[in-house]
């Protein structure tokens, strides 16, 4: 068979899409929208006819927005957010936390298994966010490198996510597309057995071998010594520093305070001469631990906040009185309200009743903070030092929108926790028992979460990921175009011809490897949506059951272990654990080989290939 012009154009557009999806400088949603526009306009201006009838109306490419798999994915994202904000997983966190303080080796296995099992039923991201502070706290107490265990924990959640239809958005997408193409409807636990066999070996590797492969890193979230924060000491009228020389101020501070610069006004910077006299309103830019910063503040009669700042006033809404005050360290994580925003844009002080005092930069701890703390654009892994009442800090934790690292109080837990767990149990049970499709049970569960107060609309909306939605819709459109123009059949025919001399089991293994390589370069969902119709075509060319080839797409598209960009939790782990790209290669490549070989043996055996 020979492809036509439309088929070739769709293939070229697919290659362009895969290229754009790997460009870090271009937002993923922008790349997806561009491809979708080109596809729609192309088929509108140059209609596609087959046997005299027009095929593929441009409006059909928008059907992905109403695709059942996408609806289920979005609903499950929001339901999972409710488990996160209510602290419903706190009991498990307490068990894991206690295990780390007594038997670290056994605790690592418990952590890996807990992460894998939970990921079979909910999004990986809140699980990783939940377990990260536990690992950090245990590392500080037990004096073991947190970098040896944080990456294995993150990869274990990906392994566990493979095991059910709702484990990841990729699973739901593959199942939804295959069902749309008239294939067998997979039950929720249909492929648990192969994942349990191969995943069991993978977990053993992550438990016993992976920690030995990882070098000791110094992550921004778990410094072995107190984190160094950049702060500004504002000279207060009537305070000790008012009218004193710099040498007198340094002597009063004990001689250990390091001043990076002295700013008198936005345009005037003073030389750091011992004889320079300080005036009210001067700002001393310093770096030190939280305890030392507060010591300098009290000793020198200065403030770590600007009492003349009219835009961020210290008032009844953000009190900083001596009684009942606490310091807390707040980590900026991907998806939090502070990620890639400034404190001013996020209205941090007025929203949370807390005063930001200093900043620890994750990627460049030695860099200076030269401007207003409220105007600095924050990045994932940055740590804010904040001060406020015990109630305000507890309220911040309970909101579930920030990661608070003080290790002294319980994780978020509200009276809605049991209710949220019960609703999640209903969602899973209803789908597993065949009472209703997962898309229906997830939407019903979302309604129950909101109706019972377990989830607010703001948190629900925040749980949605626009890049995930756009990449799925665009990938579905490309997949549909590949099928309707028969380009998927042509690619499958070419693949089968190239490997026709091999047994079917070897062909399946080669296709699984191809999908694994693709998912470590582009998004899992893009690889899944484009690979599923091709997998079905390959099975039809070979005259065998398409199910093992569909599962090859599903497993391969999930094996994003070898790069930090393959999955969103990998990026979170990269920032929080202080890892380098090479660390993912050290652990990810052998783990990928183990799972590829495992599935290459197990799938043919289970499906008699």
Image: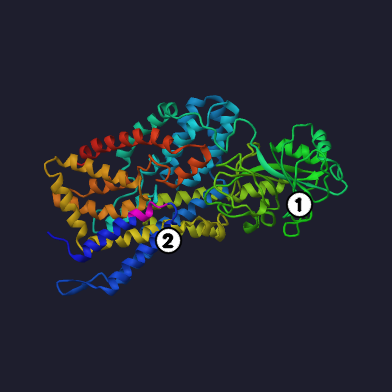
Please tell me whether residue 469 is drawn above or below residue 250 in the rendered image: below
Q: Position of residue 275 (x, y in %)?
A: 83, 40
Q: Secondary structure at mark 2?
A: helix
Residue 365 appears anywhere in the view: yes
Please tell me whether residue 300 is drawn above or below residue 430 in the rendered image: above
Quick check: 345 left or right of 318?
A: left
Please tell me whether residue 245 is drawn above or below residue 338 in the rendered image: above
| Residue bearing mark 2 | 30
| Residue bearing mark 1 | 306
Quick check: 134 left or right of 564?
A: right
The colouring scheme, among rainbow, by chain, secondary structure or one colour, is: rainbow
Q: Position of residue 416 (x, y in %)?
A: 58, 50
Q: Secondary structure at mark 1?
A: loop
Magenta-highlighted residues: 18-23
Distance, label 2 to label 1, CA atoms, is 39 Å
Q: Is residue 186 magenta?
A: no
At a point 54% along the width and 33% down the height, the residue shown is 218
Label 2 neighbourhood size at 10 Å, few (<14), some (14-19), many (20+)? some
Quadrant location of the N terminus? bottom left
Q: Position of residue 427 (x, y in %)?
A: 43, 52
Quadrant location of the C terminus? top left
């Amino acid at each position: 068979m020979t492809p036509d012009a439309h088929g070739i154009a769709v293939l070229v557009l697919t290659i362009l899409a895969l290229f754009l999806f790997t460009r870090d400088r271009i937002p993923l949603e922008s790349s997806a929208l561009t491809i979708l526009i080109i596809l729609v306009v192309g088929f509108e201006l140059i209609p596609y006819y087959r046997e005299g009838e027009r095929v593929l109306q441009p409006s059909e490419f928008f059907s992905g927005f109403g695709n059942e798999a996408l609806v289920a994915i979005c609903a499950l994202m929001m339901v999972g957010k409710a488990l996160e904000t209510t602290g419903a997983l706190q009991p498990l966190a307490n068990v894991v936390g206690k295990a780390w303080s007594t038997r670290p080796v056994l605790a690592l296995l418990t952590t890996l298994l807990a992460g894998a099992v939970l990921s079979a039923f909910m999004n990986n991201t809140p699980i990783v966010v939940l377990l990260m502070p536990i690992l950090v706290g245990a590392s500080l107490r037990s004096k073991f490198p947190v970098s040896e265990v944080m990456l294995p924990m993150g990869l274990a959640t990906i392994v566990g996510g493979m095991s059910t239809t709702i484990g990841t958005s990729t699973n739901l997408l593959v199942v939804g597309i295959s069902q749309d193409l008239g294939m067998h409807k997979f039950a929720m636990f249909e492929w648990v057995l192969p994942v349990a066999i191969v995943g069991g070996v993978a977990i053993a590797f992550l438990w016993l071998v992976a920690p030995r492969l990882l070098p000791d890193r110094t992550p921004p979230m778990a410094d072995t010594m107190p984190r160094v924060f950049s702060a500004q000491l504002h000279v207060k009228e009537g305070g000790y520093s008012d009218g004193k020389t710099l040498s007198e101020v340094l002597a009063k501070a004990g001689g250990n305070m390091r001043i990076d610069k002295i700013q008198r006004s936005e345009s005037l910077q003073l030389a750091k001469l011992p004889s320079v006299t300080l005036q009210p309103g001067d700002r001393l830019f310093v770096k030190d631990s939280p305890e030392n910063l507060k010591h300098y503040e009290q000793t020198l009669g200065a403030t770590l906040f600007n009492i003349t700042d009219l835009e961020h006033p210290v008032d009844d809404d953000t009190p900083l009185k001596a009684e009942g005050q606490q310091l807390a360290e707040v980590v900026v994580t991907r998806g939090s309200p502070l990620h890639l925003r400034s404190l001013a844009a996020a209205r941090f002080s007025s929203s949370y009743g807390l005063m930001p005092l200093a900043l620890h930069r994750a990627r460049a701890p030695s860099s200076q903070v030269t401007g207003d703390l409220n105007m600095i654009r924050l990045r994932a892994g940055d740590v804010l030092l904040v001060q406020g009442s015990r109630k305000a800090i507890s309220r911040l934790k309970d909101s579930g929108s920030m990661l608070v690292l003080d290790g002294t109080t319980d994780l978020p837990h509200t009276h809605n926790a049991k209710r949220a767990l019960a609703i999640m149990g209903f969602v899973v049970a209803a789908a597993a028992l065949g009472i209703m499709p997962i898309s229906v049970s997830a939407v019903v569960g979302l309604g129950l979460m909101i109706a019972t107060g377990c989830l607010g609309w703001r948190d629900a909306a925040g749980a949605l990921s626009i890049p995930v939605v756009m990449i799925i819709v665009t990938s579905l459109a490309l997949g549909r175009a590949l099928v309707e123009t028969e380009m998927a059949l042509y690619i499958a025919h070419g693949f089968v011809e190239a490997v026709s001399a091999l047994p079917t089991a070897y062909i399946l293994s080669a296709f699984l490897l191809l999908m694994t390589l693709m998912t470590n370069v582009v998004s899992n969902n893009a690889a899944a949506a484009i690979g599923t119709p091709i997998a079905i075509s390959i099975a039809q060319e070979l005259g065998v059951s398409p199910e093992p080839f569909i599962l090859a797409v599903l497993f391969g598209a999930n094996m994003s272990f070898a790069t930090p960009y393959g999955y969103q939790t990998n990026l979170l782990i990269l920032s929080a654990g202080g890892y380098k790209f090479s660390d993912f290669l050290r652990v990810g490549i052998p783990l990928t080989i183990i799972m590829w070989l495992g599935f290459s043996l197990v799938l043919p055996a289970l499906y008699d290939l």
